[in-house]
Amino acid sequence: MKWWQIKKRDRDLERELRSDLELEEEEQRENGLSPEDARYAARRAFGNATLIREQTQEVWGWSAAEHLGRDVQYAFRRLRKSPGVTCTAILTLALGVGSVTAVFSVVYAVLLSPYPFHDPGQIVIWRESIREIENVAPLLPDNYRHYLNLKAQAHSIQDAAILQNPAFTVSTGDDHPHVAEGLAVSSNFFSVLGVSPLLGRSFLPDEDQEGRDREVILTWSGWQRLFHGDPSILDKTLRINGEQRTVIGVLPKAFRFPVMSVMPSEATRGSTERYEIFTPLVPSSLERTANDAEFNFLVVARLRDGVSIRAAQSELDGIEKATARADRLSIHLSVIVEPFSEEITGDAKKPLWLLLAAIAGVLLMACVNLAILQIVRGVARDHDTALRSALGAGSARLVQGVLIENLLIGLAGGLAGVAFAFLGERIFVRIAAVLPRLNEVHLSTPTLAFALALSLITSLGFGILPALRALHVVPLRALQESSARLSGNKRATRSRRVLIALEIACSVTLLIVTGLVIRSFSHLLTQDRQFTAQHVVLAKADLSGVRYGGGQYLANPGADQGSLERDAMIDRTLDRLHSLPGIDQAAVTSVMPLTGDMNVDGLRRPDHPVPEGQVPMANRRLVSPGYFNSLGIPLLKGRDFSLADREKFRAVILSEKAAKAVFPGENPLGHTILHWGHIYTVIGITADARINDLKRDTPLFYLPYWDFPPFTPVFIVRSSQAVQTLGPEMRKIIWDVDPDISIPTMTSLDDQVDESVATERFQSVILSSFGVAALLLAVLGIYGVLAYSVSMRTQEFGIRIALGSDRLGLARRVLMDAFYPLISGVLLGLLGAAAASRWVGSLLYETRAVDPWAIGLSLAVLLVAALLAALLPVRRAVSVDPVEALRSD
């Protein structure tokens, strides 16, 4: 049949149907209906002219492609007829898919992405543990002699390398040296990782000997920054820690070794590519021979094929214990083996999985909203479906039309979700600087394809039920149903209520978990720290050069030439800092505040010796007079250090916690402790300042800095001037004392406090964002269902009002539609929150998993939001005009 013949028959059939429409209208008038009501009844029976035209085309057998094109056009028209519902569905899908994609890209890069090494699953870290101090330090760095012994005897280990992470002062010209991050590694380090240099060679075995360690290997980023990618880089020299080093290799661009620390859980996180320099590791003679001390290294090992981590730990631990017994050590040693990835991401793993679970909950809520929209659209579509079925449309055609409509929503939502994912990923990386491997986070083409596929699958998945519903529509019954009966469909109403309850349950769970995390963060920020951070500026100097004894074995610490040089440098700098105008206090310490436990030593009493495992442990800090005033740490008893102590005797100041551990029930003042082979007299007791870690008031003991001047002194200045103003002046003073000193850190103590709680802030901000998103989706779902219910029951409300129904009663009826799923959802959400709170309990600080304030506030916010969402539909219901309502359907 030719196309013009089809067109002619279309027109003939349309005229015939229009004639039937007129006959039906005339028959209705003869039955006593007014002309307007008769016309309305006829149209209800036959549908509008546009739909009739579409159905006549089905009768004459268009091709499959033409049917598909017609269904696409029809789907577009249906979506355009209800722009509010369509835009809501697309926005809901975009928000859910975009958020999940952004978070998953971070989770994949940090936790799941393989490291750029050969067979990274076989790479492990091992650390040592001493039973006598495992209550305060469960994991320790490695001893060099133990490393050599384990490497030589273990059959489960293919090879093992050892490393340290010192800071290098680097100079390429006449400018002031700067600090570059790097590692000192054994010569087999790169072979253990299975990495070969892009240019040049790796270290040779004899280059880890003193005097032959003058080589350096650069990363790609170090090569670009220091030498601007000079292709003739090999054999060029670089001044590191005051000594000339020869560049022998450049690593591949794809090589990124994650930030690590010799101290457990003390790695500096960040998204930047940190390591730029690798030098040979040369242990001192003491480190080579010490058997029960000098735990200063970290071991990276490769397992043999087929060897499990458990088997390797069992063998290494057995060798360690047997060696300790043979050497008759007074301590009990053991070895702990962990996957390489666990060392890097251990602290970040739980928070990231928590965030992924939270955003999965948001996606579930988005899907529930989408399902609700599809259900209400499916109910409203029953009349059109019945008409199409009555005019000859087959089951496949009916299902195809519904699925195409959902496919269009999924495609639009997926494209919008990709845009959301780009924006979300950038925001996420910006506020998640505490996470490792952030420099590897990016939205790749497969990730974006995943986002689009997720959107399509979600849309189609939640469109199957409405599509199948089309197969069960009875044409005669559907054509006879009014909008009031449509809205009162019990099955659809029950489905909507169940889905709304599920959505509210997810929202309650997420809001309560968010409330707990925020309350924990609030406790962390508002607690009494016993120090004052305002108006304090910190400047860290690096004295690791040869002039100051850096990298040298010190036979007489504190009295060698390097110590004398460091002492003189610190004295001159403090004198200059005190002379600055507007300076209230100036002091020095050996460790940057709020960087965790460092220099943990035992506090031994000469008059009361105890077994090794019972010696109280505390963090050692080397400080100058005025340190406690500079930081506002209260001195509870005794006095501060004075310059007169330098010549008289050795003095020590204890924190209150350390004093109670060493001198329980006694007045410590005047008593002595044994340290570094010297007797120190206790001259003061300070408050337990949380200067190491805001979460813990760890025991501390303070020695005067001149006893062993630190290699990385941190100068502290209290002044009303801002760091932007005071910083350059402090730099100038330090460089006037020695222009070859690098200054890696210049910051305020307020900023240091902010950085120390960056992980907790990140968790709070992200969870708050997801909590708000969940709340908005719940409100959107409640509003959407009530608004749809009111619109479909307009005629019913008009009749009730016309018959004298109280408008307050109508409002109560509308609110009851939201009340039952709201209460059910809250109860389910409380159960979910109880389970989730146990899982996140370890992330909370001084906050119970069942915190009444967090739970009460979360429920109050949800209830108020639900009430606000219901107000507009209620207002529409009580303001229905009966006359217009009776004529609207």
Image: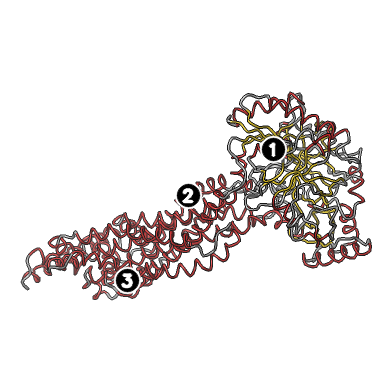
Residue at numbered disc 1 = 627
Q: Is disc 2 placed on a helix, strand or loop?
A: helix
On screen, residue 484 versus residue 227, left or right, reads left
Quadrant occupied by the N terminus:
bottom left
Q: Amino acid at mark 1?
A: Tyr
Q: Label 3 crowding class (10 Å Cα cut-off): few <14, some 14-19, many 20+?
A: some
Q: Let me know if residue 102 appears in the view.
A: no
State the residue at coordinates (87%, 43%).
282
Task: Give whichever of 44, 499 is nearer the camera.
Answer: 499
Q: Residue 820, percent across and down?
A: 34, 70
Q: Amino acid at mark 3?
A: Thr
Q: Label 2 crowding class (10 Å Cα cut-off): few <14, some 14-19, many 20+?
A: many
Query: Marks 2 and 1, Cα distance to the nearest angstrom?
Result: 49 Å
Give the quadrant of residue 25. bottom left
On screen, residue 653 versus residue 723, left or right, reads right
Mark closer to the chain start, 2 or 3: 2
On screen, residue 531 versus residue 260, left or right, reads left
- Closer to the camera: disc 2 or disc 3? 3
Q: Which mark is residue 180?
A: none
Task: Give whichever of 559, 254 is nearer the camera.
Answer: 559
Query: Marks 3 and 1, Cα distance to the nearest angstrom?
Result: 70 Å
Q: Amino acid at mark 2?
A: Phe
Quadrant occupied by the C terminus:
bottom left
Query: Marks 2 and 3, Cα distance to the nearest angstrom?
Result: 33 Å
Mark closer to the chain start, 3 or 1: 3
Q: Residue 363, percent across and down?
A: 47, 60
Q: Is residue 229 above or below residue 870?
A: above
Residue at numbered disc 3 = 493
Q: Which mark is residue 420?
A: 2
